[in-house]
Image (cartoon, grey):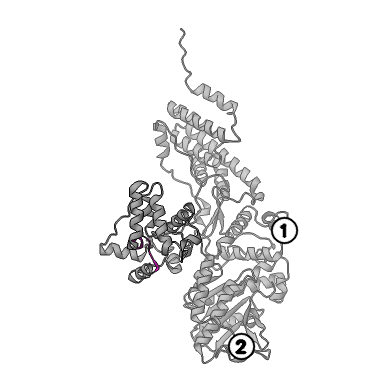
């Protein structure tokens, strides 16, 4: 989109919406005698910037207390910063990066650069919202950064009354919603739009609710009273139609209440039925209407009960949302029940008969369960071996961590992002913001670039959207969001550089970004080449990076590009585990041999080569029971694969040689 920073500002005389390009404006000063209305205009712009889908991606920074709650309602786009010094430094870094990118592509302006095929993801607008600005040199520096040529994709919106705006800034006199002003540079009369504090609070609540996955209780009208259900059932069973009810046809009113009482008394399973007892009870009900009224509540009784003790309302939306951030569970019990318990007035339990149960007041619905917390759970390690616990099993689990050789990757920035692919896929260390529903595609992009550095946009399109003609706007939005999510290093350099800053106009991650597969390759290469203590330690370090089968938890309809890499990872892990297990067994280190083999099985539990290593280790330790259990586990794994597969001939032969053969006595 050539104008991603377009926002609505108000209406013209014909009622048409008026839009302004904040990048072109640079500094928008909301002035005027009515400070409250200037804040309302700022709040309207802030909500639109946080929620509009038109630009694809925006970076918005709220200074101090400006637009409270907006960063929580739209965390992908909006960040909050405490001081003007930090805000100025952030905007200066942003504008400097974009000016370097403009020079690299040879574009004279943002509009020209955005039309280039590979450049769209580099021009994300950065907008600072500042209700108040100090009158000092820092603000002057901030305005100078925006005014410098060529213009970068940045803007400042402020309603500060103490700030002297630069001459090129747009100043809007904010008086009231009904006041007509002239838009600077256009001679267009407009009426400004704003969001009052109450409406702004409502907007924040709506944005928060839209982004929340918390369930709230259903309204009361959706709940069914079991007493009403039984009354309707009895009416149908005994043929008490509408014409027979006489008067008010609702259950529990007029003569219908008496007929239901008689029907319940004569129903099998009731408290009294059949014989003289049932007839007497029915007669008593006809002669004593008060008895029926005691059992079936009338409108008057309901009104009186309501006045005496009003039922408590369910938890509010704010209570439920606040419960997410509270360490303790919120008290969701109805206030009326809590009051009765405090007063020590326990109500008598209802009778066990079906009639009394049906006539009892409907109990309040159960308190809703706390909202589920969505987390990524790593793939579980192989189940512990059942049966007798052998000495070698306990020793293998308790084997202490050996001293590890120095790893060059450890000297890199510890706060930098890291792509974890040897197990459940995840990206750790990202300091930016991104919506949860956009996280999957960003993780896939980072994983792809970690394994394929230096690719062009055609390769990205083929990997992430195979077989599709990709709109460059969609691709650029994904790249821009991923860049913002990964964040920057201590020097302000993006962990996902703009393509114009890479030197060869190719996409790659920054040098501080690490990948567990790259570290595994480096350590395994060292370990396989050296047959000494340092080589064994390098292999152990490499296997310690394995957390499960590579790329666990991915969408089966995505990551087609990763299949060759997954096979290479699995093969390399198995080879490294086999080598280290063999070395440790030959060195009489049975726990170390078992640890290495089991670490490899995390990535390939079906590898019989590693299972044979476990068999040999148990045999070397003289633990026949553990050997039998390990053989049984392999049999169970083979039964689960493809409906059951046979054990490899080499494995079967090894077990025949290792396991003691049963002795058959001749008769």
As rendered, which of 427 and 412 lies closer to the eye? 427
Q: Residue furthest left?
A: 344
Q: Is residue 491 left or right of residue 592?
A: right
Q: Is residue 433 left or right of residue 390?
A: right
Q: Is residue 331 left or right of residue 484?
A: left
Is residue 296 covered in magenta? yes
Q: Can residue 369 be seen from the camera position used here?
A: no
As rendered, which of 277 and 505 lies closer to the eye? 277
**Residue at (68%, 91%) from the top-left corner?**
187
For the N terminus, the image quarter is: bottom right
Tell me where residue 94 sits by quadrant: bottom right
Q: Which residue is mark 2?
A: 191
Disc nearer the start of the sequence (2/1): 2
SS label for mark 2: strand
Q: Position of residue 346 (x, y in %)?
A: 28, 59
Q: In whole angstroms, how far apart are the C-alphas of marks 2 and 1? A: 47 Å
Neighbor class of circle 1 (other Cα within 10 Å; few <14, some 14-19, many 20+) is few
In magenta, the rendered stretch is 292-299
As rendered, which of 42 and 312 lies closer to the eye? 312
Q: Position of residue 580 (x, y in %)?
A: 51, 37
Q: Which residue is mark 1?
A: 458
As rendered, which of 291 and 333 lies closer to the eye? 291
**Residue at (65%, 83%) from the top-left corner?**
18
**Residue at (42%, 39%) from the top-left corner?**
397
Tell me where residue 25 sits by quadrant: bottom right
Tell me the tag on residue 66: none
SS label for mark 1: helix
Neighbor class of circle 2 (other Cα within 10 Å; few <14, some 14-19, many 20+) is many
């Amino acid at each position: 989109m050539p104008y991603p920073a377009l926002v609505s500002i108000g209406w013209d005389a014909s009622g048409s919406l008026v839009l302004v390009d904040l990048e072109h404006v640079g500094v928008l000063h909301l002035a005027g005698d009515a400070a409250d209305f200037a804040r309302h205009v700022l709040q309207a712009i802030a909500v639109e910037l946080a929620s509009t889908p038109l630009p694809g991606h925006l970076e918005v920074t709220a200074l101090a207390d400006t637009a409270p709650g907006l960063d929580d309602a739209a965390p992908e786009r909006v960040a909050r910063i405490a001081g003007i010094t930090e805000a100025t430094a952030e905007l200066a870094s942003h504008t400097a990066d974009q000016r370097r990118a403009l020079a690299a592509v040879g574009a004279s302006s943002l509009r020209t650069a955005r039309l280039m095929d590979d450049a769209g993801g580099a021009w994300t607008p950065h907008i600072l919202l500042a209700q108040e600005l100090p009158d000092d040199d820092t603000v002057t520096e901030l305005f100078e950064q925006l005014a410098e040529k060529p213009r970068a994709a940045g803007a400042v919106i402020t309603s500060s009354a103490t700030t002297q705006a630069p001459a090129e800034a747009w100043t809007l006199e904010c008086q009231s919603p009904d006041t007509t002003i002239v838009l600077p540079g256009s001679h267009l009369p407009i009426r400004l739009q704003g969001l009052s504090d109450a409406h702004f609070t409502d907007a924040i609540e709506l944005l928060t609710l839209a982004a929340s996955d918390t369930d709230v209780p259903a309204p009361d009208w959706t709940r069914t009273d079991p007493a009403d259900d039984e009354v309707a059932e009895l009416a149908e069973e005994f043929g008490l139609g509408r014409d027979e009810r006489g008067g008010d046809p609702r259950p529990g009113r007029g003569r219908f209440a008496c007929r239901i009482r008689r029907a319940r008394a004569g129903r099998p399973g009731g408290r009294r039925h059949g014989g003289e007892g049932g007839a007497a009870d029915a007669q008593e009900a006809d002669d004593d209407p008060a008895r029926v009224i005691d059992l079936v509540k009338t409108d008057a009784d309901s009104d009186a009960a309501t006045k005496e003790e009003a039922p408590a309302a369910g938890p509010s939306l704010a209570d439920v949302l606040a419960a997410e951030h509270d360490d303790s569970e919120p008290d969701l019990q109805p206030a009326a029940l809590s009051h009765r318990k405090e007063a020590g007035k326990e109500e008598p339990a209802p009778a066990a008969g079906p009639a009394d149960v049906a006539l009892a007041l409907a109990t309040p619905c159960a308190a809703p369960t706390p909202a589920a917390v969505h987390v990524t759970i790593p793939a579980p390690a192989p189940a512990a071996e059942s049966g007798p616990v052998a000495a070698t099993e306990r020793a293998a689990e308790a084997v202490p961590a050996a001293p590890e050789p120095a790893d060059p990757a450890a000297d890199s920035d510890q706060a930098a992002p890291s792509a974890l692919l040897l197990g459940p896929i995840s990206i750790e260390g990202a300091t930016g913001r991104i919506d949860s529903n956009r996280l999957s595609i960003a993780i896939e992009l980072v994983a792809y670039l970690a394994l394929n550095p230096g690719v062009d946009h055609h390769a990205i399109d083929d990997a992430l959207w195979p077989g599709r003609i990709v709109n460059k706007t969609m691709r650029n939005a994904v790249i821009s969001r991923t860049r913002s999510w990964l964040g920057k290093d201590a020097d302000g350099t993006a962990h996902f550089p703009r393509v114009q800053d890479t030197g060869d106009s190719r996409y790659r991650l920054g040098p501080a970004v690490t990948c567990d597969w790259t570290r595994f390759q480096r350590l395994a290469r060292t370990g396989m080449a050296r047959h000494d203590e340092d080589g064994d330690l390098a292999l152990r370090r490499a296997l310690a990076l394995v957390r499960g089968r590579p790329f666990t938890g991915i969408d089966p309809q995505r990551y087609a590009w990763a299949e060759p890499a997954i096979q290479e990872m699995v093969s390399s892990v198995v080879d490294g585990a086999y080598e280290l297990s063999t070395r440790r067994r030959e060195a009489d280190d049975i726990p170390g041999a078992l640890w290495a083999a089991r670490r490899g099985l995390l990535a390939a539990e079906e590898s019989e080569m590693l299972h044979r290593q476990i068999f040999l280790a148990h045999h070397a330790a003289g633990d026949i029971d553990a050997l039998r259990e390990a053989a049984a586990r392999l049999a169970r794994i083979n039964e689960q694969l493809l409906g059951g597969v046979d054990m490899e001939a080499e494995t079967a032969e090894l077990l025949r040689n290792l396991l003691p053969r049963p002795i058959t006595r001749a008769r």
